[in-house]
Amino acid sequence: MENLIYLFILSILIPFAITGISAAPFVPTAKKDLERIINFSRIPKGGKLTLIELGCGTGRVLFEFARKFNNLNLIGIEMHPFLYFFTKIKAASLHLKSKVNIKFSNFYKSDLNSADIVYLYLLPRVMPKVRQKLEKDLKSGTKVISYAFPISGWDPKEISKEEKCLPIYLYERP
């Protein structure tokens, strides 16, 4: 029985370590910044748009967008099995399953070309690789919202800074 407990603990911790090494450890977007992120995204009320979150964790950002907008196709990409299943269950329990699609995948291997908006909260050390992925996949005019850290090599269209809050960077693909 003790071995099963260790196996269970390792099955949770190992994926956390892998995701932490590959792109970012699991640190959710601050609740206090959700409204600011939504306002800063300047999403029009009309027309169907696709928002993709890279490393969606528990879906906090996606679910907030789902509550505020009916015209968004929301896709979260998550490679940690525990977070993926947790977020799928949470989407169903919040009755947002039809509005929020969670994909179990590594976003570096995912096709992002359907995105009109991309949201990410990733570490600076991975931004050069993320930038290459975005430059390869995103169409002209796609908005990219980066929470806390800038995308190296890109000039933000706008930056939202408030006292005691992390910055939000808004980019638009040329």
Image (cartoon, grey):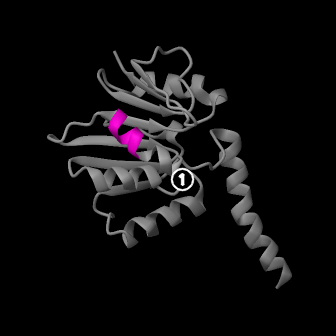
Prevalent SS, magenta region: helix
Which residue, as the protein is rendered here, is positioned at the far left?
Answer: 46
152 left or right of 60 in image: right
Residue under the point 45% across and 40% down:
110
User: Which of 66/100 is in front?
Assistant: 66
Q: Residue furthest front?
A: 163
Indicate the quadrant containing the N terminus: top left, top right, bottom left or bottom right: bottom right
- Please tell me which residue is depicted at 66% across the width and 46% down the height of the picture: 25
Between 22 and 151, the one lying in front of the other is 151
Callout 1, which amino acid? Gly
In terms of image quadrants, where is residue 163? top right
- Specify start and end residues of the magenta stretch as a single range: 35-40
- The answer to whether residue 72 is above or below residue 99 is above
Residue at (39, 45) in percent of width and height: 35
Quadrant in the picture for residue 80: bottom right
In the depicted structure, whether residue 42 falls above or below residue 57: above
Examine the structure image and report whether residue 38 is included in the region drawn in magenta: yes
Q: Position of residue 59 (x, y in %)?
A: 46, 55
Q: Is residue 38 left or right of residue 70?
A: right
> Is residue 103 placed above or below 85 in the rendered structure?
above
Give whichever of 135, 121 is nearer the camera: 121
Percent across and percent down for residue 171 are 40, 23
Image spot of residue 108 (x, y percent): 52, 36
Crowd around label 1: few <14 · some 14–19 · many ≥20 (10 Å): many
Q: Write down the residue under mark 1.
A: 57
Q: Residue at x 64, y 41 (%)?
A: 24
Q: Position of residue 73 (x, y in %)?
A: 28, 48
Q: Quadrant of the C terminus?
A: top left
Disc 1 is placed on an element classified as loop
- Residue 23's image quarter? top right
